[in-house]
Image (spheres, helix red, strand yellow):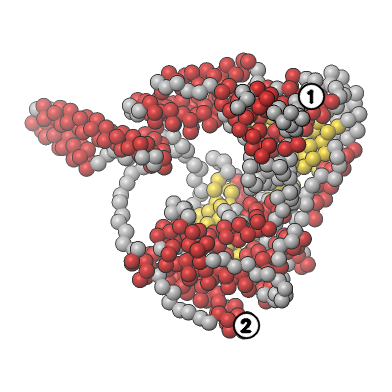
Amino acid sequence: MHECQILFQPRYSFNYSHLFHLNLFCLYCCYTTCNIQYIQYYAVATDTISIRTFSNQKPWVDSTIRAAVNKRTAAYNAGLLSGNMSEYKASCYALRRAVRAAKLRYRERIESHFQLNDSRRMWQGLRTICAFGNKSSAEVRADPSLADELNTFYGRFESNLSSASLPISASGNSSQSSDNHVITVSEDEVRRALKRVNVRKAAGPDGISGRILRSCADQLAGFFTSIFNESLATSVVPTSFKKSVIIPVPKNNNPSCLNDYRPVALTSIVMKVFEGLVKNFICSSIPDTLDPLQFAYRPNRSTDDAISHILHSSLTHIDSNNRNYVRLLFIDYSSAFNTIVPITLASKLMDLGLNSSLCNWILDFLTGRPQVVKVGQFTSNSITLNVGAPQGCVLSPLLYSLYTHDCVSSHSSTSIIKFADDTVVLGLISNNNETAYLDEVEKLTSWCQDNCLSLNVSKTKELIVDFRKRQQQPYTPLMISGTPVERVSSFKYLGVNISEDLTWTTHIQTQVNKARQRLYHLRQLRKFRVSPAILKTFYSGAIESVLTQCISVWYGNSSSHDCKALQRVVRLAERISGSALPSLQDIYLKRCKSRAVKIIKDSIHPSNHLFTLLPSGKRFRSLMAKTERLRRSFFPQAIRILNSKPAS
């Protein structure tokens, strides 16, 4: 720590007060870049040790085993010459003993991590033993031209902007009104943020690792505080903070086109710390009631809430009249984050009440971003982007949700449910009148065009839930921009397969097959003689998590046959681990109660109104249900569970 104090003192200091009165932004950026390079120099100059490893090398292989292997090889060669293999047999036996002893030491090390609650190292060891999570990812072809092609492809949305949509100049951003409040961050806030940096995250283009920032947080906090505050005061983000390196990740095993590569941005960790501080201020400034049907990036919201809201609205509508039905449109966007128009976002943030200084800072943050694409050892030429929010930035998800906050339903019989960019248009159809639903889809299409969001019609699907015995007339075909939307019988939404008959056999069978595959890894751990407590922990993290994903949504309406298939996996895991495991029924009841309590305590939750206390104040009013489908769904079940709990 003392070395950090000596090394990381800012090399240069300026009098900011007169610097920015002169509007010399270039000097400010040079000052920031110079000190960042100074930190990077000492980070690179740190002594490192190179260790040669092999992909198939087990972690318990140490110098003792390597010496035994060399001895066995020498004994084998000597035996071939002399014809006496007794020495070779003895060396083989010694090698087996060394391997058993090394495995025992490694197992004891993992169990010590478990006893000390060091879950990260414990899971690293377990993954190594049973090869869990070692998926063979598709390799990106080593083509020098691919990097430039991908960079041009990722920047293709630049051409969609009209001249009126181009961002204003940085000098225009810097003019602040006298009554405009400029936010600031304290040195203590910066210090705490630096100490929370994840040291295992990859460094950005500046090469400054998270370990350096975390270890030297006390010495660097003052320097970065001055940089952050001057950036906020002038609404200018240094270019060195905006640089990004795009690493293309294949979406499938056989990428055939440029769209099969997902862009993941490596940005400066220092900038991520800065973004986190700004994010806290934005969240505190935005009203909690904004866009209640956006279930992502908000406290006490989850995928369970989004799916439960869709199902309850659908089941309640169908339950009210046996002639009603529901149409669900699952929207897919093309590169949603990359199509955000910064000037439009800044205007929307101003309308939400954010001060102009912060809005201009966000505008500058999203414009003038140098970007390169790196494919293996090849790096593309740099291009500058003025549209979109880079995937991998701390602020990008929040900014996207604020960008789409005005995408709301305009009819009482329709709803637009959002979880980040996963959007569903819910149409409650009565008397075969689909006018409101079709109008809502048309308005959503127009909204996307006005906000430069591109709908991927080929991946947009429609699912119709209709339990009428006789359909009086065919459904009106759904068209988006002249292209028909495909109707499907089942759709995977937020990890849950929703079927048109609202049964869960397809989803449960998928999860059972996935869990059965992971039982192999549990057997490998038992073969390694890991303790039953660790086996139970592995089951909870790797197998039970698959079986119970969104269990409060679907388990209540599952058939007895499907429930037995789930429980068979649990019983098989019990025999392998040698420990008693909780039944899925118990987990379901516990999750339902826990979720219900959280919703009741959250007054702004969109489902809070469903939990109404009776005049006695001890029980909740039951939800009326004509059909078993609605009665066994989450909200009626949760109310029954709460009402059945023993009085305290």
In the figure, is residue 517 to the left or right of 361? left
- In the image, is residue 340 above or below residue 462? below
- Considering depth in this image, is 139 or 65 the residue closer to the camera? 65
Q: Position of residue 544 (x, y in %)?
A: 52, 28
Q: Amino acid at mark 1?
A: Met
Q: Which residue is mark 1?
A: 624
In the figure, is residue 248 to the left or right of 11? right
Q: Which residue is mark 2?
A: 21
Q: Nearer the viewer, mark 2 or mark 1?
A: 1
- Quick one: quadrant of the N terminus? bottom left
Tell me, for residue 529, which label it has, or none: none
Q: Position of residue 360 (x, y in %)?
A: 68, 68
Q: Residue at x 68, y 53 (%)?
A: 400
Query: Callout 1: few (<14), some (14-19), or many (20+) C-alpha neighbours within 10 Å?
Result: few
Q: Amino acid at mark 2?
A: His
Instruction: Give the secondary structure at mark 1.
Output: loop
Q: Position of residue 469 (x, y in %)?
A: 84, 18
Snapshot quadrant of residue 424: top right
Query: Callout 2: few (<14), some (14-19), or many (20+) C-alpha neighbours within 10 Å?
Result: few
- Quick one: quadrant of the C terminus? top right
- In the image, is residue 214 above or below residue 600? below
In the figure, is residue 369 to the left or right of 530? right
Q: CA distance from mark 2 to mark 1?
A: 67 Å
Instruction: Give the secondary structure at mark 2.
Output: helix
Q: Residue at x 63, y 55 (%)?
A: 396
Asked whether residue 23 is in view, the answer is yes
Snapshot quadrant of residue 182: bottom right
Q: Position of residue 590 (x, y in %)?
A: 58, 28
Disc 2 to disc 1: CB gap under 8 Å = no
- In the image, is residue 355 above or below residue 537? below
Q: Residue at x 31, y 40 (%)?
A: 59
